[in-house]
Image: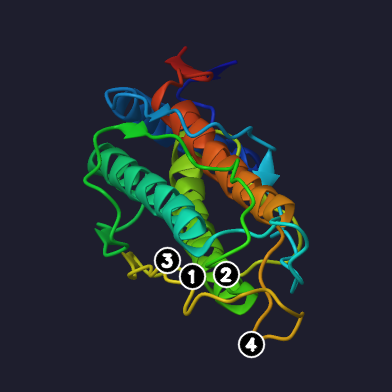
């Protein structure tokens, strides 16, 4: 799209108050931001998720009574959660890379505890094998999952600020979500608490069925993919509007 401007374009008030002037100024700002953001190398996502077009609502994690070695093990699931924490650190680092070129928000602080970012999201574990001992507590799993989703929503807020700055589509939420706007990403503990035996469905003993755990991990991997896909649109765009003097 090309917008032509001459000396008389804004000689009256109509073009000032009908949104034309604002559109031109925004176009110039977005074009500048697109060019600046394109100097940032795209993030690589090997997490294994599939972008959904929005951050899907969390999977319901139910209290489960063990049945023939089909529970999620405590150590295995906590290690799987750590792969998501590492992915979040990659996203936060990439957001700061974008911010250095397009200052749409303040500098971010990553206290999550993820591995040192290297520009690549590693594989996110989402195919756990069932076990019958040393099981992750359903109560503890829900607590860690909630924190991970909070940080994902927080990261989405900053991805969307950058997306608006360059004029690309933002990432939506399924359901009503009010993200944390803080520029500090607090520490994430992946400890699900004392292992349980899964002998009944009470909070004290209930485990998580391995299929339920894998659905949860898949939802997390998909959310990460939505964020990395949006970031790569931000860093690989090109101006779509040209403003010329006539």
Helix or strand or loop: what does disc 2 sit on? helix
Measured from the top left, where is residue 88 in percent x and y?
40, 50
The residue under the point 51% across, 57% down is 77
- Front position in the image: 9 or 87: 87
Quadrant where the image shows the N terminus = top right
Mark 3 lies on residue? 190
Would you say the residues marked 2 and 3 are in contact, meaning their CB atoms lie under 8 Å apart? no
Q: In the figure, 39 relative to 30: above or below?
A: above
Instruction: Return the disc, 2 or 3, that comes first in the chain's sequence.
Output: 2
Q: Nearer the viewer, residue 81 or 176?
A: 81
Residue 87, position in %: x, y? 40, 45
**Earlier sequence position, callout 2 versus callout 1:** 2
Estimate the x, y position of residue 63 in percent, counting from the top left. 74, 74
Q: Tag 4's secondary structure?
A: loop
Q: N-terminal of the two: label 2 or label 4?
A: 2
* Image vertical order of residue 231 relative to residue 150, above or below: above
User: Image quadrant of residue 67?
Assistant: bottom right
Q: Which residue is mark 2?
A: 141
Residue position for label 4: 204
């Amino acid at each position: 799209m090309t917008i032509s401007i001459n000396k008389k374009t804004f000689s009256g008030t109509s073009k000032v108050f009908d949104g034309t002037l604002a559109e031109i100024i925004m176009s110039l700002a977005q074009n500048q931001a697109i060019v600046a953001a394109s100097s940032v190398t795209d993030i690589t996502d090997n997490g294994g998720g599939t972008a959904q077009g929005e951050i899907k609502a969390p999977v319901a994690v139910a209290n489960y009574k063990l049945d023939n070695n089909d529970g999620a093990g405590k150590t295995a699931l906590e290690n799987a959660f750590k792969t998501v924490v590492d992915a979040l650190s990659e996203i936060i680092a990439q957001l700061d890379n974008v911010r250095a070129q397009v200052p749409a928000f303040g500098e971010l602080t990553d206290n999550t505890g993820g591995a040192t970012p290297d520009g690549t999201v590693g594989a996110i574990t989402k195919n756990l094998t069932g076990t019958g001992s040393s099981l992750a507590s359903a109560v503890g799993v829900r607590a860690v999952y909630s924190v991970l989703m909070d940080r994902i929503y927080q990261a989405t807020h900053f991805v969307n600020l950058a997306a608006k700055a360059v004029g690309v589509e933002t990432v939506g939420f399924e359901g009503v979500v009010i993200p944390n706007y803080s520029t500090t990403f607090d520490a994430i503990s992946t400890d699900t608490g004392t292992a349980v035996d899964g002998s009944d469905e009470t909070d004290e003993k209930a485990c998580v069925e391995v299929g339920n755990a894998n659905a949860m991990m898949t939802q997390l991997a998909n959310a990460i993919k939505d964020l990395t896909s949006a970031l790569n649109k931000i860093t690989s765009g090109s101006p779509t509007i040209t403003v010329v003097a006539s």
